Amino acid sequence: MAEEQDESQWPIGFEGHAREQRKRMAALPLSAKIAWLEEAQRVAEHLQRSRRERLPHPYTKAQAMTITIDGCPLAVHDEGSGPAIVFLHGFPLDHRMWEAQLPALPGWRKIVPDLRGFGASGVTPGTVTMDRFADDVAGILDALAIPKAVICGLSMGGYIALAFWRRHAARVSGLVLCDTRAVPDTEEAAAGRRKSATQVLAEGSKVAAEAVVPKLFAKGTQEARPELLVEYRALMSGMPPAGVAAAQLGMAERPDSRPTLPTITVPTQVIVGIEDVISTPAEMQSIAAGIPGAEYSIIAGAGHMSPVENPSEFNFELLGFLERVQ
């Protein structure tokens, strides 16, 4: 039997969150509990099948379209129907990090791009700012004739989501900020990104992968699922070096988003893994506190990659939020 955790040792806000989650689960009718268990099984089967049958290329022709924005071809996965949600991946990843969320959102149109410079999308050398990424998302929505969408971003995707709010607020029906930060880089951190960008251009994306992967996953994930680290190290190492470097330089110059937080007027959910060492639960709670009416959720057994490490709990929180947004 697993050792019972001491809730008093969890980060600020987690004990109350855990109690609230248990109350919500207990209040569900039996039919809803059964539906949730069936959904969790579908997600598990989807993950097993996709990893067993995964193609070398992230998309098949039937799964993705190409949308060209300012001369750059962007690979975009468009699945389902209903209100739209856009998933923005972290650094240096692509759409595949969201594979456990797609089958879990019936009734939603899921828009999942490979951001400029990543996956099957084209590369823009130099510096790609968070504003440039945000404008790409607006261009994708224009091309798909989608007036408004929930914007969900993890880590770098969260930086882009905040930039999207600043530049395209009228297109946002809700925000989901996952394992991200509102503060800008310190001078030391920005210098580290610029140094890493230079190394990536000289030696390849494996340099970034080796530096990033150990920080992404919770200790329990690393011990129980070492194959996940191997998979993500390979995924990151395969990203175009020029795209990885351009994003690093863009993140290094991103603005302070803390003044943006109180301007957010749409429903917002803030989600973080309990063991995230990059954007800690305390830091994420401060983001939630800065946004009027924002919801705050902590995902057990997860680090920075909460949608990947604990998709069942992540999806439970996301689905509950989306039901309230609808």
Image: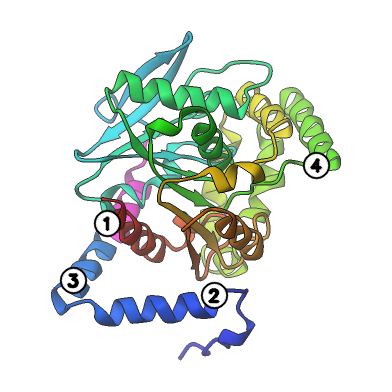
Q: Are marks 3 and 1 in contact (CB under 8 Å)?
A: no
Q: Can you identify the residue that label 3 sits on? A: 32
Badge 2 element: helix
Q: Position of residue 229 (x, y in %)?
A: 57, 53
Badge 3 element: helix
Q: Nearer the viewer, mark 2 or mark 4?
A: 2
| Side (left or right) of 65 relative to 38 | right
Considering the whole magenta stretch, tell me its main secondary structure. Answer: helix
Q: Can you identify the residue that label 4 sits on? A: 189
Name the one closer to the observer, 253 or 38: 253
**Could you tell me how far apart the alpha carbons at marks 3 and 1 are, in whole angstroms?**
14 Å
Q: Earlier in the sequence, mark 4 or mark 1?
A: 4
Callout 4, which amino acid?
A: Ala
Span of residues in magenta = 44-55
One can see residue 27 in this view: yes
Which residue is drawn at the image coordinates 65% and 43% (left, top)? 259
Name the one closer to the observer, 273 or 200: 273
Which residue is drawn at the image coordinates 60% and 78% (left, top)? 10
Q: Position of residue 107 (x, y in %)?
A: 19, 47
Badge 4 element: helix
Q: Can you identify the residue that label 1 sits on? A: 323
Vertical relation: 73 (above or below) 110? above
Q: Earlier in the sequence, mark 2 or mark 1?
A: 2
